Amino acid sequence: MDTADFLQILDREGRLLAVAAAAAGTDAKVPTCPEWQVRDLLRHTGAVHRWAAAFVADGHPEPRPLGDPPDFDGAELVDWYRDSHRLLVDTLAAAPADVRCWTFHPAPNPSPLAFWTRRQAHETTIHRYDAETARGGTASPIAPDFAVDGIDELLRGFHARSKSRVRTPEPRVLRVRALGAGADGVWTVRLTDEPPATVREEAGAAEAELSGPADELYLALWNRGPVPTVSGDQSLAALWREKGGI
């Protein structure tokens, strides 16, 4: 997938998020994030959109904190989210391909612009799913190739950082396998008392395997549902459920 693909997905997913949030109402509970109501979801995601857009627009080379979310609520908050999303999409669409700015994880990306477009496409997709669970009914589908990319970004990006809590006192090996048409992906995750080290290949024996259709596995690894299939040592799946949150 290329940056144009991710931008298109980001555009669509943010629109869907806003529609679901408006239908649910800002008081609605978010089942996938039990401590949140829809207003928290909108304030968080909108603030992240504005934060990301500023790095690209300003070419900012260093990390900086999220801005404070607004006190808006109800329809006014949904409109603020829509404006935040549009600002991000328009900023990424207008940015030069060689823009230089800060990024925050090591998953392979050809450029900072590619990083932020990809990252925000996945951020928005996960929170769109959250909004749709708050609304109820059938969630929008996630394409298998995009889900595989999101698994790769999570394993080789987020969990390669020092913030990852998925660690074991002794070395362990976990396999992750996406199944189905258009969803070819397998990863070997080596767990130690350091951040996980992941390669995108079937490298040696594994003590447990997490597998399933790419879209279900993607959501499960982001702790939005159960892992479809666990084989081998069940404790490694339990470790992921307990420590895999970002």
Image (cartoon, grey):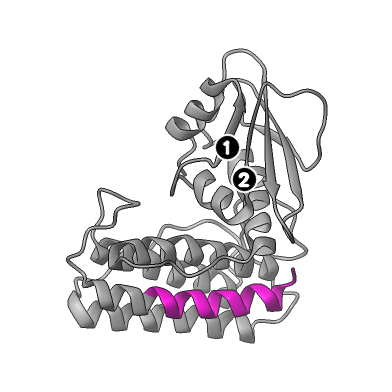
Magenta segment: 1-17
Residue 229 circle label: 1
Work out whether residue 220 or residue 63 is closer to the camera in this orientation and state it. Answer: 220
Residue type marked 2: Gly
What amino acid does circle 1 point to?
Thr
Q: Position of residue 121 (x, y in %)?
A: 56, 68
Rendering coords of residue 24 (x, y %): 25, 71
Task: Measure the alpha-carbon separation of dots 1 and 2.
Answer: 6 Å
Helix, strand or loop for the magenta stretch, by majority: helix
Sequence-wise first label, 1 or 2: 2
Whether the magenta-drawn stretch holds residue 7 is answered as yes
Residue 117 image point, x, y percent = 62, 70
Instruction: Kindly indicate the quadrant of the structure image that contains residue 74.
Output: bottom left
Mark 1 near mark 2, Cβ–Cβ under 8 Å?
yes
Residue drawn at x 32%, y 51% is 33
Pointer 2 local density, CA inside 10 Å: few below 14, some 14–19, many at least 20? many
Which corner quadrant of the image does residue 134 belong to?
bottom left
Q: On the rendered structure, is 209 left or right of 162?
A: right
Whether residue 230 appears in magenta in the rendering, the answer is: no
Disc 1 on helix, strand or loop? strand
Residue under circle 2? 212
